[in-house]
Image (spheres, rainbow, N blue to C red):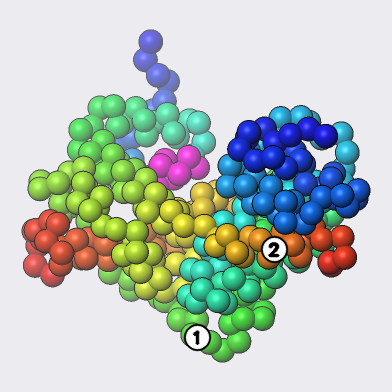
Amino acid sequence: MRSTVPPIDCHAALDRLYEYLDDELTPEIEAAVRDHLARCTRCFGRFDFERSYLVFLETRARTRGAPADLKRRILAELFTPNGR
Amino acid sequence: METCVSGRCDGPRNLATALPAGQWALRSLERHAILRIAHRSESLVPDTQDDPRRTFEREALPHLDAVYRVALRLSGEAAEAEDLTQETMLKAFRAWHQFQQGTNARAWLLTILRHTFINQYRRGKHQERQIDIAHVEQFTVFQDVQDADPEGTFFDRIVDDEVVRAIDALPEEFRETVVLSDVEGLAYAEIADVIGVPVGTVKSRLYRGRQLLQKALYDYAVEMGYITRKTAP
């Protein structure tokens, strides 16, 4: 069964690139973009590239957290009965 | 007393409930709580008590790493980022009764962090550069690399430190939007709340910020010989 979503062109799909990857579209528009990507190799390539890049960015920038000593100090201040 | 679900430490299952008794050595409690954060273990038992320490520990403390990372990106100095993180967590704990259950605790903490940074730490330090969004160069990395490396595998050769350096080099308004979105995973509406701007502004800053950062990382990859530039710079 064909979807009832009106087809969109490359320009309209690219306009929604980030909102699509960020999961910020309404279900209808998201379906329209997905439908376009299924038919358009060129746009699919671009979307795939940007998605991979965002995964790379998140992975690289999230490797480090707060130093253990800082966590220890914060916990001591928060949960020591005599503390604040 | 229940034991930790992680099975990797011997402390009580819940730090806060154990505290009033005061029987546990602080060191052991801290160790337990630190390990819990490290394990990212979730309490499997639904809360029947509303001890604020217990809910704060369960809902806010797991975001300590995120608070620190954003503090570091905002401030640029490790020592200041530590102070900012500590102050943010203490303020948050004191204001915990104002937190709306069911909303994103990470976004709430980052809002407190940002206010603290702007009101107490920035104080005329690096001036906020006003960027005219319309004049930011339009450039799409994909157009340059789609023939040579359409999947962008050259990015994977860039190490963590270089990625962080490139983020730090972004103008502030783009840097904070990119960090909140792409590193800490906040939704557009949450970022809008944290920064105090309309969602449309978040979108446009994110669009330009991502372009700028991607271009900077691409330039670095070219410089390192990970990929050959197609067009003249």
For the residues labelled 2 and 1, the Cα–Cα distance comes to 30 Å
Q: Residue at x 26, y 36 (%)?
A: A44
Which amino acid type is marked by label 1? Gln
Position of the N terminus of chain A, as image quadrant, is top left
Q: Residue at x 23, y 53 (%)?
A: B157
Nearer to us in this view, A40 or B115: B115
Q: Note whether residue B198 is visible.
A: no
Name the side, left or right, on which B229 lies relative to B189: left
Q: Residues within 10 Å of mark 2 (few under 14, many from 20)?
A: many
Report the predominant secondary structure element of the magenta stretch: helix
Looking at the picture, how far across and down is residue B36, in whole percent? 64, 44
Position of the C terminus of chain A, as image quadrant, is bottom right
Q: Note whether residue B150 is visible.
A: yes
Which subunit holds the residue at mark 2?
A
Name the side, left or right, on which B63 lies relative to B174: right
Residue to which mark 2 is pinned: A74
Task: Please report the bounds of the magenta region as a residue range.
Answer: A15-24
User: Which of the 4 quarters of the picture holds residue B124?
Assistant: bottom right
Q: Residue at x 33, y 34 (%)?
A: A8
Nearer to us in this view, A67 or B116: A67
Name the side, left or right, on which B201 lies relative to B135: right
Against B161, residue B18 (above or below) is above
Which subunit holds the residue at mark 1?
B
Looking at the picture, how far across and down is residue B213, in whole percent? 33, 63
Q: How many marks?
A: 2
Which numbered circle lies on residue B127? 1
Name the side, left or right, on which B30 lies relative to B147: right
